Amino acid sequence: MGNTTSCCVSSSPKHRRSNHHSRLEPYRPDAELSREDTACNLQHISDRENIDDLPMEYNPSDHPRASTIFLSKSQTDVREKRKSLYINHHHPGPIRRKYSSCSTIFLDDSTVSQPNLKYTIKCVSLAIYYHIKNRELDGRMVQDIFDEKLHPLSKSEVPQDYEKHDPEQKQIYRFVRTLFSAAQLTAECAIVTLVYLERLLTYAEIDICPANWKRMVLGAILLASKVWDDQAVWNVDYCQILKDITVEDMNELERQFLELLQFNINVPSSVYAKYYFDLRSLAEANNLSFPLEPLSRDKALKLEAISRLCDDKYKDIRKSAKKRSVSADNLAVVRWAPAILS
């Protein structure tokens, strides 16, 4: 599997197909069986792929216009920080952001097609941190496969009050960075990991908490690396990174993760772009700015070459569009007339 992540698409967590299997009835050749009787109540592929009719709030990882969960959960803390600074009359500190001028243009090296690996992992870790900190405490269902007490990642004993202490952002960042560094994963894989994580929370109706966040993140990284990268990391390779975990445990984690996702591993480009820009908004709101560097002459020449290449690419398309309009009107010469807007 490569960058085309369009294997399976399910409808919604609210529209799950039934897992009940009826016993086989004796064969009756004279009876007319309907589609519902012969298809075991399976959804048609066209019904499963139509997500436009579903509520957007139920599909933040499916619908490009639905707001991401992590951004909405982080806004509460951002507002509280700003309110505290205003009440206590604390200055936020010196402004470290660089602004472009007539003589110097500042750019960062992160784009939607080639994100910066280090800062993308930092942003994803921050999003996971807000998921854990602002989780819903309504007694949601907990999946045993993600419980670190039942399936520990190391031989060291898990404390009894482990689920009561929220991890810090640095701890989450070190865990994610270790996996990405050892497996040599890309920044795009980190964004897909966050998409799968929020899809899991939505579909399975569970919350990420201190007792299960490591195994949930591990399962999302495992699946994202196989979907996104052409040369995916094998499950046994993760056992070399996490020394005390077994291959059987990794296989079971992957299987149940896929089942909870309803085998929906499709990530549309519009959803990917939404998560990328929302991560940048999260970084901006938390003073986690991407590094800016002055535009050098070599980089300016590369950007100019890319712009010229794209202009030449679409020039032929514009010419063909003009020819089609001429042939449709049976005109021999193209005449341009100034447009008057009133």
Image: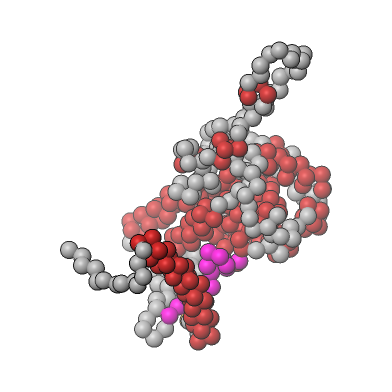
Instruction: Measuring from the top left, give residue 3's x and y in whole percent.
Output: 64, 58
Which residue sits at x=51%, y=69%?
A: 290
Instruction: Measuring from the top left, give residue 117's x and y in whole percent.
Output: 61, 66
* Residue 126 higher or lower than 292, as above or below: above
Front-most of 105 and 291? 105
* Residue 137 higher or lower than 115, as above or below: above
Q: Which residues are magenta?
A: 105-117
* Residue 294 higher or lower than 248, as above or below: below
- Residue 124 occupies which quadrant of the picture? bottom right
Front-most of 56 and 145? 56
The image quadrant where one finds the N terminus is: bottom right
For the stretch drawn in magenta, what is the main secondary structure?
Answer: loop
Q: Can I make out residue 264 in this image? A: yes
Is 135 positioned to the left or the right of 262 in the image?
A: left
Instruction: Measuring from the top left, give residue 183's x and y in whole percent.
Output: 73, 61
How many numbered tags mark residues here?
Answer: 0
